[in-house]
Image: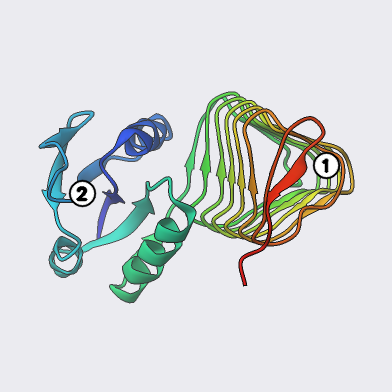
Amino acid sequence: MKPDVIVMGAGGHAKVCIELLRASGSNVAFAIGGDDSPETCVGVKVLKGDHHLAQLAAEGYSRAFIAIGSNALRSKLADFAIQQGFSLVNAISPVANISPSVTLGVGIAVMAGATINADSRIDDLAIINTGATVDHDCRVGRAAHVAPQCGVAGSVLIGERSFLGIGTKVIPNIEIGAEAIVGAGSVVIRPVQAGSKVLGTPARLVSPRKV
């Protein structure tokens, strides 16, 4: 099997993730994008169309990273890559600060300057973005995204495919439900219902859960 990584995605998020993979010693062979993608992504050749993944598997590639910002699409493409026989790798900045007691899933991205403290758990496909802090005993669910400069206090549960906008602050012991959206700059001081959208300081409901 070839050791190089195949990156699914060719946009801005993919650029950062490719550089994270390189910084951790992995070579990225190809990026897979859409019909409107550029020809290269930070120097990596872009193959247009997800159908290329099966051919790459046949050629001996077996390691993939899903570099898509959309939580739902990232999760869907990860399932597709696994079905094609790929294993998911992590893209973790060498200048992130991760406690040795943290549990990490697969397919996750941890950007430069991020901090994850003791006994936290980061599930598969989650993103801990640039300069974000996740304190002790937190859980970040599958394919959730903690955006740049967020501050998540201890014992917070962030549900799968949820999104915390840039600069969000969360006090301790809060639960944020699956597929919730917290608007940029919000301060979360009470639980957030699954599928809802909250915004403000303190964060208030602006869009209820979709039935």
Residue occupying the point 58% across, 52% down: 144
- Which quarter of the figure is the N terminus placed in? bottom left
Give SS at disc 1: loop
> What residue is shown at x 40% (from left), y 59% (from top)?
73
- Badge 2 or badge 1: first in the primary sequence: 2
Label 2 or label 1, whichever lies nearer to me, is 2
Q: Looking at the image, which residue is at 78% across and 48% down?
A: 138
Q: Quadrant of residue 53?
A: bottom left
Tell me how far mark 2 sits from mark 1, CA to CA. Answer: 36 Å
- Look at mark 1 in the image and give the residue it sits on: 136
Please provide percent x and percent y for residue 115.
Answer: 68, 31
Residue type marked 1 = His
| Residue 109 x %, y % | 50, 43
The local crowd at label 2, few if under 14, some if 14 to 19, many if 20 or more residues have their Cα within 10 Å, is: many
* Element under disc 2: strand
Quarter of the rendering containing residue 114: top right
* Image disc number at residue 33: 2
Which amino acid, by three-letter code, is at mark 2? Answer: Gly
Q: Position of residue 206 (x, y in %)?
A: 68, 46
The one nearer the camera, 98 or 141, is 141
